[in-house]
Image (cartoon, rainbow, N blue to C red):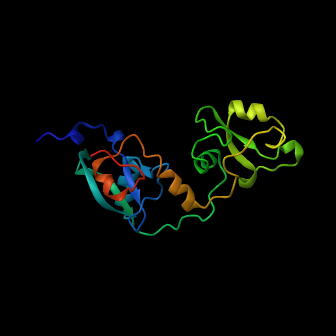
């Protein structure tokens, strides 16, 4: 019997990782483990296999279907306050310049410039495209006659996960679809 998973290279068979409550650990980036990490976690009895690929791997003594969806046995409580990183900042601002809405050449901008005492915090940094950042320079938005679409704020992990649902990955294995909920309609 032919199945497309049978010809897949194991490296293209990541496992979707669910928390113990069967929700993804993360939507964006999608919580995926390489097949080796997933198989190791199965043997260490840290996860349960929820779904499998048709693809098998073999050892000298046994064969093993690669897991496509796994669930942690112990619940991992998400951090209330996400780390302040460039990626999380862009995700908070939905990968758009907060001055013009462009999605290209993204960088970050200190609303109150550091030269004027502004700090690098959630509440003072916004996503900006390179042209807007250059145009604003070392001035405040008011001084530069520029308007912010949204004032910077400290997001919760839940807010970042909600934003992440707006950006589904390019590839979703059929076995993952029952565990993922996106704001846009998935392919049938």
Where residue 61 sits: x, y (%)? Answer: 22, 50
Q: Name the residue nearer the viewer: 98 or 181.
A: 98
Tell me: 129 left or right of 45.
Answer: right
- Rendered residue at 40%/46% (across/down): 34
Where residue 86 sits: x, y (%)? Answer: 64, 45
Q: Name the residue nearer the viewer: 100 or 156.
A: 100
- Rendered residue at 32%/53% (across/down): 177
**Quarter assignment of residue 170:** top left
Tell me: 105 left or right of 61.
Answer: right
Is 135 rendered above or below residue 149?
above
- Rendered residue at 41%/68% (across/down): 20
Viewer can see residue 118: yes
Q: Residue furthest right?
A: 116
Tell me: 2 left or right of 181.
Answer: left
Where residue 119 sits: x, y (%)? Answer: 81, 50
- Rendered residue at 75%/40% (across/down): 146
Quarter of the image containing the N terminus?
top left
Where residue 9 sits: x, y (%)? Answer: 30, 37
Tell me: 21 left or right of 113.
Answer: left
């Amino acid at each position: 019997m032919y199945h497309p998973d049978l010809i897949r290279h194991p490296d293209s068979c990541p496992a979707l990782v669910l928390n113990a409550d069967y929700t993804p650990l993360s939507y964006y980036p999608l919580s995926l483990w390489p097949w080796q990490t997933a198989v190791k976690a199965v043997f260490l009895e840290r996860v349960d296999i929820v779904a499998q690929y048709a693809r098998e791997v073999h050892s000298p003594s046994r064969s093993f279907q690669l897991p496509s969806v796994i669930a942690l046995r112990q619940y991992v409580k998400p951090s209330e306050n996400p780390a302040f990183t460039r990626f999380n900042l862009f995700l908070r601002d939905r990968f758009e310049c907060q001055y013009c809405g462009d999605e290209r050449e993204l960088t970050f901008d200190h609303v109150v410039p550091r030269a004027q005492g502004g700090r690098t915090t959630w509440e003072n940094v916004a996503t900006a495209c390179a042209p807007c950042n250059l145009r604003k320079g070392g001035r405040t938005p008011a001084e530069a006659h520029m308007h912010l679409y949204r004032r910077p704020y400290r997001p919760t992990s839940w807010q970042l996960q909600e934003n992440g649902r707006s950006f589904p990955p390019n590839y979703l294995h059929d076995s993952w679809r029952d565990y993922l909920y996106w704001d846009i309609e998935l392919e049938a």
